[in-house]
């Protein structure tokens, strides 16, 4: 497809209406809220069947797990849109889709190569009183994405890029979720997940049933005004859930007394949290003139423990001796901001939700380069930062 010699697009596409499948369903319930949800459903069922004693309707209707987090063999109905082997370029020039855009010097614009897309909109087929809403799921992967032909002013190149979005699926007025666990679908001789037709090679949606927004970049290279240069792997995720144990610190004696009364242990406190995470690995950067400081392929730098052969270490292999400025190498960092998932089910409690923050960063080397060492030397190595705290 060519629109005005400005938008160039090719690939395989397909829209499928009326699709249905069975899979596990994530309820979004913290185990602490599972009993409350069961009680609410029992009350709703009792309203439909007055005079009839009802109990454990939730588990009876949905074959729900003991911790209430997953219901098995739930039917979902909706539609899908799939695309595979898609290449797109927006801008000036005549792109050759058989070659990487980064190797084509006559292009000026924005492009994506070897893009696959899976889009789904499904609703769980549940009894009416659940009030289950539809779920929107989106997953895309591209081999390469970039801005091309901008000279030294702006260079952006990303490789091995994945974007995930999963949202919706509220049920029981927001007390729980009714979201498909696509990864629970098993396909003989093929990847796990919901198979989505594209008109060409199928794509597979394998999200795990939580509300998430995620971006993963296997390799990002950014240069601004030929002064700032960044390279490495980056990832951002929002909405994934984890089971953690919280040390109550000064509240431990009170928790221990309460735990003895209840016949259970409350310190550490088992808690399901929803997290926002940001991470980076094998990052290298440079700010100055004549950069970048490191450049070229990443073929050596590490050693195979078994054979002693050279292997990539995540850093470009070549050094630019003409660069003058600040260089940082071998930077890894991770940041997680977590809050109890159960608080999100009750909007009025959001202002009182405790937030837990954990962060770790490591800098292999930070140094001033390109300056005569007899005049000025600045260098720091093996810098590590750790943060673990919370606030209300």
Image (cartoon, rainbow, N blue to C red):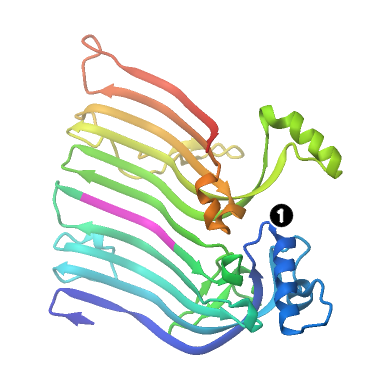
Residue 210 horizontal side relative to residue 98, left or right? right
Main structural element of the magenta stretch: helix, strand or loop?
strand
Q: Which residue: 38% across, 83% down?
A: 13
Residue 227 horizontal side relative to residue 276, left or right? left
Instruction: Please rate how many residues cluster around mark 1, counting C-alpha atoms within 10 Å: few if below 14, some from 14 to 19, many from 20.
Output: some
Please check the rendered image and state whether residue 161 is part of the magenta-colored stretch, yes or no: yes
Q: Is residue 192 visible?
A: no
Q: Quadrant of the N terminus?
A: bottom left
Residue 125 horizontal side relative to residue 268, left or right? left
Q: Decide which of 25, 184 is in the foreground and name it.
A: 25
Which residue in the protein does label 1 denote?
Answer: 32
Q: Residue furthest front?
A: 51
* Figure quadrant of residue 207: bottom right
Q: Is residue 140 above or below residue 312?
A: below
Q: Which residue: 48% across, 77% down?
A: 120
Q: x, y (%) of residue 138?
A: 45, 70
Residue 307 horizontal side relative to residue 60, left or right? left
Residue interval drawn in magenta? 155-163
Q: x, y (%) of residue 194?
A: 57, 76
* Figure quadrant of residue 190: bottom right
* Figure quadrant of residue 365: top left
Q: Is residue 258 above or below residue 165?
A: above
Label 1 secondary element:
helix
Q: Is residue 99 visible?
A: yes
Q: x, y (%) of residue 312?
A: 45, 42
Q: x, y (%) of residue 260?
A: 85, 38
Please check the rendered image and state whether residue 138 is part of the magenta-colored stretch, yes or no: no
Q: Which residue: 41% across, 71% down?
A: 116
Q: Decide which of 211, 161 is in the foreground and name it.
A: 211
Q: Which residue: 35% across, 40% down?
A: 316
Q: Decide which of 311, 187 is in the foreground and name it.
A: 187
């Amino acid at each position: 497809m060519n629109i005005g010699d400005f938008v160039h697009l090719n690939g395989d596409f397909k829209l499928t209406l009326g699709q249905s499948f069975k899979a596990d369903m994530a309820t979004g319930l913290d185990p602490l809220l599972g009993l409350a949800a069961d009680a609410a459903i029992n009350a709703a069922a009792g309203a439909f069947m007055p005079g009839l004693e009802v109990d454990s309707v939730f588990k009876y209707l949905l074959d729900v797990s003991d911790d209430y987090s997953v219901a098995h063999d739930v039917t979902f109905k909706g539609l899908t849109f799939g695309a595979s082997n898609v290449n797109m370029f927006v801008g000036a020039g005549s792109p050759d889709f058989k070659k990487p855009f980064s190797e084509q010097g006559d292009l000026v614009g924005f492009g994506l190569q070897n893009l696959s897309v899976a889009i789904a909109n499904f609703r769980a087929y549940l009894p009416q009183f659940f009030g289950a809403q539809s779920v929107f799921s989106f997953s895309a992967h591209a081999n390469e994405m970039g801005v091309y032909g901008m000279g030294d002013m702006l260079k952006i190149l990303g490789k091995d890029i994945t974007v995930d979005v999963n949202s919706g699926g509220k049920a029981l007025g927001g007390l729980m979720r009714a979201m498909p666990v696509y990864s629970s679908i098993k396909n003989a001789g093929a990847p796990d997940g919901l198979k989505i037709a594209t008109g060409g090679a199928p794509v597979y949606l394998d999200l795990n049933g939580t509300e998430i927004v995620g971006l993963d970049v296997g390799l990002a290279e950014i240069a601004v005004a030929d002064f700032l240069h960044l390279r490495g792997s980056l990832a951002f995720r929002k909405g994934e859930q984890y089971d953690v144990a919280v040390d109550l610190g000064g509240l431990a004696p009170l928790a221990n007394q309460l735990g003895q009364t209840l016949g259970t242990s409350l310190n550490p406190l088992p808690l399901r949290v929803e997290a926002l995470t940001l991470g980076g690995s094998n990052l290298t950067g440079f700010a100055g003139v004549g950069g970048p400081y490191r450049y070229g392929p990443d073929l050596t730098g590490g050693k195979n423990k078994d054979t002693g052969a050279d292997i990539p270490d995540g850093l470009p292999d070549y050094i630019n001796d003409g660069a003058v400025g600040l260089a940082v190498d071998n930077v890894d960092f991770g940041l997680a901001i977590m809050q109890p998932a159960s608080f999100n089910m009750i909007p009025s409690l959001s202002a009182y939700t405790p937030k837990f923050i954990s962060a770790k960063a490591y800098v292999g080397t930070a140094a001033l380069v390109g300056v005569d060492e007899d005049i000025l030397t600045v260098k720091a190595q093996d810098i590590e930062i750790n943060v673990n705290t919370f606030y209300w």
